[in-house]
Structures are given as structure tokens and as C-alpha cells.
Amino acid sequence: MDKDDASYFEVIAAPLSKQSVDDDISRLPVWRYHKHLCERVETKDKSKRISFNSAQERIRAVKAFYIWSHKRGAIDSLPFSLEYKQVRIKSKAKSGVSSLFQLPTSNNRSGGLWKWVSNLSIPNTLKQKEDSPDKGLQPYSPKELKQLLETNTAQKETYKLYLQCALLGGLRSFEISAIDQKDLFNPDEKENEKRIPKLNIVRKGHKPVRLTIARVLMKLLYNHTLTIQNMKRRTKHETNHGMDNSEHPLPLFMNSSGSRISEDTPGNTISIVRKEQRKQGLEILLRTFHDLRATFATYVAKYLIDKGESESSIRQTLMTLMSHESFKTTKRYIDFAKSVSVDAYGAMSEWVKDIYGDVNELLMREAEDATAS
């Protein structure tokens, strides 16, 4: 709307049929945005393309905003259809979303499931096919890591730490948002010299684990608790929920209200990086936030291969770090690491040794402690 100097007050009632969305309707801001999203889903330019699901989420958010505006009387009509129909799909309300911004509700009618549906949606015909059989395994190259880490976004304290959690610990976006301060300590203090850094997190599939991380990553997380911003947000959190509240543990990452950040917040860092690169006319990063996890696994595997570790030992290490239930997934990282050239680390060689060597040493010590006990 800012770009097109448009206003959301610009509305007229839309036809109910998708086929009857005529020229008058198509010129409205919401329908121009709909067209823009469809074009971004369809484009062959990977730097501009967004997924079908992302486009659907964006148009759904816009639709909810218009409905809210109409309910409060800010606009006279909706610029899209809204019908209460019998449908076969199920719809669950998202937790944490105010009912003020949700679709109107109505009592269930007999004869099946009823739901509000609209002609403002992304067509299923635009769903993309997989671009590559290796889509699930796309580690960053040293060049791509340099491209990412040299951006202004990656230099900002919180964004930088999100990236480090994924790159140095293999953490997913939702796992980063779930880190609690009670698990953190200063590994440099003498009493913590032999203490193994661990995070209590719930991994994919609702699987709780105590994840071993590198001491250097633990130090970075601990240092974040000492920042002025974190201390201010901690005060807000404890004002709202009290101190040491087991039902509302103190998060490491909080928003300005003192609440835990959303599960998607760390992953959105890459979108912000791309926006910066696009604005500066730089090459656009093609890798995703989740690809940093693949980078972590691949570099751990390569480090262990270079050390001469057996494949069974590497497999066990990776399965522990990544919480894989299937060796098939782990083996892909090992196979990929074997194909990486000897000098793939480049200027990062010492850094790789410090980070991933630390993780391996901690796992070995943990195994020894378990055997001794």
C-alpha cells in the first residue's frame, strides 16, 4: 500500500464467484496484492519466489485484517466474498491469536462441517513441485556463509545469535525460541570447567531431549542474558508472571513486551537479510535458515572424517546432535561431507576446528561419564 500509495479504505463489495472478479474489483489494493503474491509463487527467479504456503498465509492475514476492519466499522464492505459453506477440510484456531482478528464464528450446523470460505485465496494450481531431489540437504558453502555473515543484519546482536544457534548448534527456529535461561551458565567460571553444556528442548515430533552444545555457544547464550535489553525484558516478564514460575519459565529470547518470541522469529532473519541485500543491489542469498542446520551437520561430519573417525562413530555423533530417529537421514549428511573438498573450510578452518571439535570432545566426555557412573 505504501509503494502504490493505496489505502485499505478503498473497497467495494466483491462478487461471490471467482469468475466474476471483474476489472473494478481487480484494481482494488487487496486484489492487486493477491496478484503480486501469485506472481511471486510462479516466478522462476529463486531470489523473489515465495512458497505456496507462505503466500497463502500472507493473503489469509490480509483477509483477517479486512474482516476486523469491517467488524469495527472502519470500512463499509468486504472487497472479497465470504460465505458460510459446508466443506470437508478441518480448521483449527491458532493459539495465541486474538479472536478479534479471526473469522466470524457461528454455531455448527447439522449435516457436516461448516466453514467460512472466500474467493480471496491462492489457487492450488500454483503449488510448486520440488526444485531438486536434494532440497532437504542444502548446506551453505563457505562463499554463501561469508555472504550471509557479512551483512549488517548478521552483525546485530540478536539476529547474529539466532544464526549462531543454527550454525553452531544445529537448532531449528522453533527450538531457538524455546530456550530458557535456567539452562544457561558461564562456562568460563572455574566451578563450571567440567560441566557439560546442555539445553532442555523439545525437538521435532514433540521429543524432549537434553542437547549437548559447544561451550562457545553456551558462552554466547549466557552473554545474551547480561545485555541491557535482555535485563529490561526480563523485568517485564517477571512483573507479568513472577519469578521462578514453572508454568512460565524465563525465556532467553523475549519481545519488547517481555513475552517469549514466536517460533518463526529466528527463521525470519534470512528474509531480513534478503531485504537488505535487495535494497543494496547485492547478490540475493538463496539458502534458508534451516539450511544452517544442514551446514552444522555436514561440517561436523567433515571434521570427524578429517580426524579419521569411523563411520559408525560419526553416525552416532550426528544422530545424538541432530536427534535423528533414522540413520537414513544421518547418512545423507555423511555422504555429502565425503564429497566436500579438503580445503572447503578455507579461511574458516580454525573456526571449524574450535566449534565442532569442542562438540565432539564434549560428547566423548559425556559418554565416558555415563560409562563410569
Image (cartoon, rainbow, N blue to C red):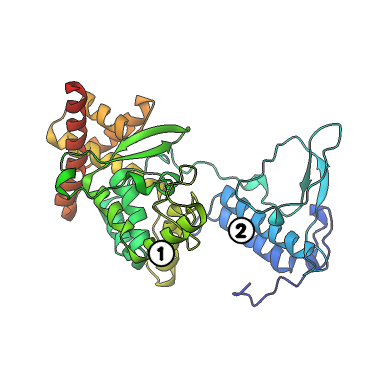
> Which amino acid type corresponds to the residue marked 1 in the rendered image?
Lys
Q: In this view, does 192 lie above or below 43?
A: above
Give coordinates of residue 317: x percent, y percent: 25, 31
Viewer-side residue, 167 vs 212: 212
Viewer-side residue, 83 vs 264: 264
Q: What element carries label 2?
A: helix
Viewer-side residue, 49 vs 334: 334
Q: Is residue 80 above or below residue 168?
A: below
Viewer-side residue, 333 vs 132: 333
Residue 46 shows up from this direction: no
Which residue does the numbered mark 2 point to in the structure image? 37
Give coordinates of residue 112: x percent, y percent: 81, 32
Q: Is residue 305 left or right of residue 144?
A: left
* Quarter of the image where the N terminus is located: bottom right
Q: Do the residues labelled 1 and 2 touch (CB within 8 Å)?
A: no
Q: How far apart are marks 1 and 2 (CA)?
A: 38 Å
* Quarter of the image where the C terminus is located: top left
Residue 94 shows up from this direction: yes
Which residue does the numbered mark 1 point to in the structure image? 232
